[in-house]
Image: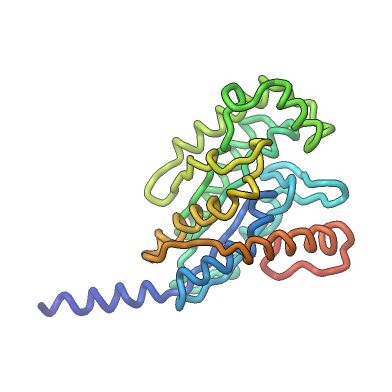
Amino acid sequence: MSFVLPLTNSTEDQTQNPVLFIFLGASNLARSFHGLKYCIERCIFPRPASFVHAMGPGRGYVSRGGILNAIYSPILNCGILEAVRNKKIKDQSVVALITDIGNDIMYGVSSEKIINGLQYLLNALGEFKTNIFITSIPVDLENDISELHFHIIRQIYFPKSPVKYSQASNNIKAINKFILQSSNKKITVINDMKQFCGIDKIHYSIFKSQSAWSHVVGKLTASLGTNISPKLKTSELALSMANNIARILLTDMLGIANKTNETF
């Protein structure tokens, strides 16, 4: 009987520890970031939550990328890992989401270099005893997209890309194989996001984004022992999209507004 009480107190203390969330991604993440943030804060309340993120449309992990004159540094070289080392406090839990992998492929980066970059990132996050969640690339070109469809998408999103259909297909297979094989006690692979993709097979459908990100938040918060079923509100998703447009225009393109201290 005397051994039960200390264990319970320890568990209760642990569930009240602050949590640092690290979000890494591109356009899908950027469009819904604020909704994710609000939803997570609701789910883990009263635990304090803090956030750092590196994201943006067209952003790569190992290559520079973006849209128009909004060009972002590679996520691996943006300084976010160094900031986490300085920001993390004692007894703080760390949860990381690695998503929107694939833009580097269209910038001509080899699958080997992308995989090496992801491995470095997983190792670096592991130093913080992080609960890591990583989404696979939610498309199989040979089964989901015709070669004509691929060329149309490439012309719209990556007009300067020289990457061919077969090259992109092989790279996606190699990267997804690495991601799936990376799964362990501290790395959870989210491999079912294809169901939420829209017609371009890259972005989550505007009609399914709410469900997509509620699904992801459920994975993230479950690792912290919460039993709340998360659901992004429509108003939060709309606010996220508005904030994303404002950030791209005012901060990333025009430089009128400064980045927040959680932005990399």
Quadrant assignment for the N terminus: bottom left
Q: Residue 89: x and y, percent? A: 51, 73
Out of 87 and 38, give the one closest to the viewer. 38
* Residue 255 relative to residue 190: left or right: right
* Residue 42 relative to residue 145: left or right: left
Reply above or below: 174 against 84. Answer: above
Q: Total marks drawn?
A: 0
**Which of the 4 quarters of the picture holds residue 164?**
top right
**Which of the 4 quarters of the picture holds residue 240?**
bottom right
Out of 194 and 23, give the one closest to the viewer. 194
Reply above or below: 109 against 183. Answer: above
Q: Is residue 124 visible?
A: no
**Which of the 4 quarters of the picture holds residue 119?**
top right
Q: Residue 263: x and y, percent? A: 70, 64
Q: Residue furthest left?
A: 1
Which residue is at 70% across, 21% downward? 147
Which residue is at 37% across, 49% downward? 185
Q: Residue 114: x and y, percent? A: 63, 37
Quadrant assignment for the C terminus: bottom right
Q: Is residue 176 visible?
A: yes
Out of 221 and 19, give the one closest to the viewer. 221
Which residue is at 69% across, 33% downward? 105
Q: Residue 115: x and y, percent? A: 58, 36
The colour style of the image is rainbow
Out of 145 and 50, give the one closest to the viewer. 145
Which residue is at 69% across, 49% downward? 27
